Amino acid sequence: MADVCPSRSEPTLSFTQGLILGQLSVVLLLAAFIKFFIFGDPPSPEVVASIRATDRRSRTLAHKKSILSLRETNALQLVQNPALNKKHVLRPGPPTLTIGSILSKTYYKVDSHQPESLDWFNVLIAQTIAQFRSDAQHDDAILSSLSKALNGTARPDFLDEIKVTELSLGEDFPIFSNCRIIPVDEDGLSFGTGKAFDANMATREGARLQARMDVDLSDMITLAVETKLLLNYPKRLSAVLPVALAVSVVRFSGTLSISFIPSNPSNNEPAKMIFTFLDDYRLDFSIRSLLGSRSRLQDVPKIAQLVESRLHRWFDERCVEPRFQEIALPNMWPRKKNTRGGDETISDVDRSMSKAKGVDIAKDVREEARKEIEAEAHGGADRVPDSLRYRHRPRADEEFPGAGSMPGSMPGSMP
């Protein structure tokens, strides 16, 4: 039986048709990417704020849960090994001022005290901010500081120099209200949430008082910059894309928490003030963008979403619980170790004081001499000066030193 070769299948599409189909698919994918990724409608601010608040709240609850579980583990270890709880005390010290005693002596009842309005505090803060804005208008220190911060060593190679084109510090002021005092433990957790406050619970080490107040700001604080995106492949400066960006803070509302931590002289730690914001805050931005030099793209939604997300992350990583900002407070009592200046400085001060006294004395002498001259001038020409009254009359031998003497010759010399 003769071998029969199988028939060869012919391609359904030619090379040209496949090339065209591939190009069309790439164009469609690119168009879909531009439409839905770059020019897609962003979600509403309420939805975004709700999603971010939920994420922040979940992080806070997870942090509190980890703290409580760690406490349970430590308590179990102390029960199993009581020797860990022993403290060797050399001598009893003075009784420490507890939170309960502070609240009792200041007549502050945590459970029944009404929140304060803080109107006086708003006036002081407004004056401080107004002075800060006035100083900023007459000084370029803020612009230079911002330029140095934006053009730091961490700037990537594909980014050109960043220039600040607009800076507005706003016109309104933040309003603080609804201030209340809450006792918290060393980890910042409230004592007995939902229960009556017990002063005996706040006697352990690390307990402190925390002031919480609501903050509300509606303003237009703007920072606008411009730069260029550089394409350095395949060669340096292959392409340049100008970029302009303006970010404005239009509203901020949240809860500010301020605490005072006493000093610890044994560990050489000064007194500190810490502040943080609770996770229920809301921060709204207005972001404007401009890409290109000739064919410009204005207010790209995706760029606004990326910038806003980055700003929220930056704020959460620094000022939102469980993270906080810490400020060391100076010691108000004068101490020898805080004294500055040596003996050379004191000698210089003494010399400068002596020089100043000498100048004052010389000035007084010149003033007295001027008064005497004026008095003599007003006395008249016929008045005999006091300096001539007591001049002795010349004797005969002094009046005529020698007969026939020549002027300029020595007395008693012969011609």
Image (cartoon, rainbow, N blue to C red):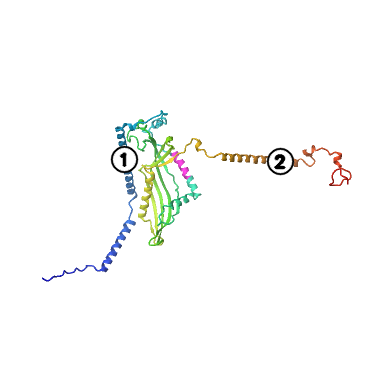
Of 249 and 23, which appears nearest the observer? 23
* Left or right for 373, reference 240: right
Q: Amino acid at mark 1?
A: Ser
Three-letter amino acid code at the position of disc 2? Ala
Q: Count the marks.
A: 2
Q: Residue 369 shows which numbered tag?
A: 2
Q: Where is residue 236? Give x, y as percent.
A: 41, 61
| Highlighted range, magenta | 119-130
Q: Is residue 167 left or right of residue 80?
A: right
Q: Position of residue 210 (x, y in %)?
A: 39, 37
Q: Residue furthest top?
A: 92
Residue on which disc 1 sits: 66
Q: Is residue 42 above or below residue 79?
A: below
Q: Looking at the rendered structure, which numbered label has been put on residue 91?
A: none
- Assign the magenta stretch its main secondary structure: helix
Q: Which residue is depicted at the point 75% across and 41% down?
A: 376
User: Of marks 2 and 1, which one's residue comes earlier in the chain?
Assistant: 1
Q: Position of residue 189 (x, y in %)?
A: 35, 37
Left/right placement of residue 68 relative to residue 342 reads left
